[in-house]
Image: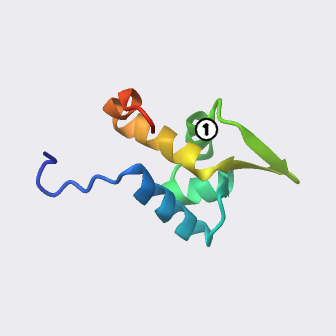
Amino acid sequence: MPKSGVNLMNKQDLVRDMKSHIGGGGFITLNQLRKYRHARHENIVALVDGLEYFEKGKSKEFFIPDVATRILEEKLPEFRSQPNK
């Protein structure tokens, strides 16, 4: 049971929120992700390290569900052991 006042987001909610942040679509760039997370570029690069991406011009686009999984793994270690993430 979550602690009082704690808002736990599941993967589907996180994907929806990220898509809403970028205005729709299934991919997010490093810069968009940096703004979404309010994080330094170095931290975002570390977050997506090892994820597959598409190059579009000078930017890299990451599949939002992959990024959402990584965020949840980072914040909720128990998420790593769940099947069918």
Task: Residue 64 in the image: state x and y as whole percent.
Answer: 59, 52
Q: How is the image coloured?
A: rainbow
Q: Is residue 16 above or below residue 6?
A: below
Identity of the residue furthest to the bottom in this view: 23
Q: Residue at x 53, y 61 (%)?
A: 18
Image quarter in which the N terminus is found: top left
| Horizontal side, residue 1 vs residue 72: left or right | left
Estimate how packed mark 1 is, as few (under 14), some (14 to 19) or many (20 or more) residues with alpha carbons within 10 Å.
some
Image quarter in which the C terminus is found: top left
Q: Secondary structure at mark 1?
A: helix
Q: Residue at x 65, y 49 (%)?
A: 63
| Horizontal side, residue 1 vs residue 82: left or right | left
Identity of the residue furthest to the top in this view: 81
Q: Could you say which quadrant of the image residue 48 lies in?
A: top right
Task: Residue 19 in the image: state x and y as whole percent.
Answer: 56, 64
Q: Residue at x 31, y 31 (%)?
A: 78
| Horizontal side, residue 53 vs residue 21: left or right | right
Q: Is residue 30 above or below residue 43?
A: below
Q: Which residue is mark 1?
A: 48
Identity of the residue furthest to the front in this view: 84
Task: Residue 58 in the image: state x and y as whole percent.
Answer: 85, 51
Q: Residue at x 49, y 63 (%)?
A: 16
**Total marks placed:** 1
| Horizontal side, residue 78 vs residue 42: left or right | left
Task: Residue 44 in the image: state x and y as whole percent.
Answer: 58, 43
User: Which residue type does callout 1 highlight?
Assistant: Val
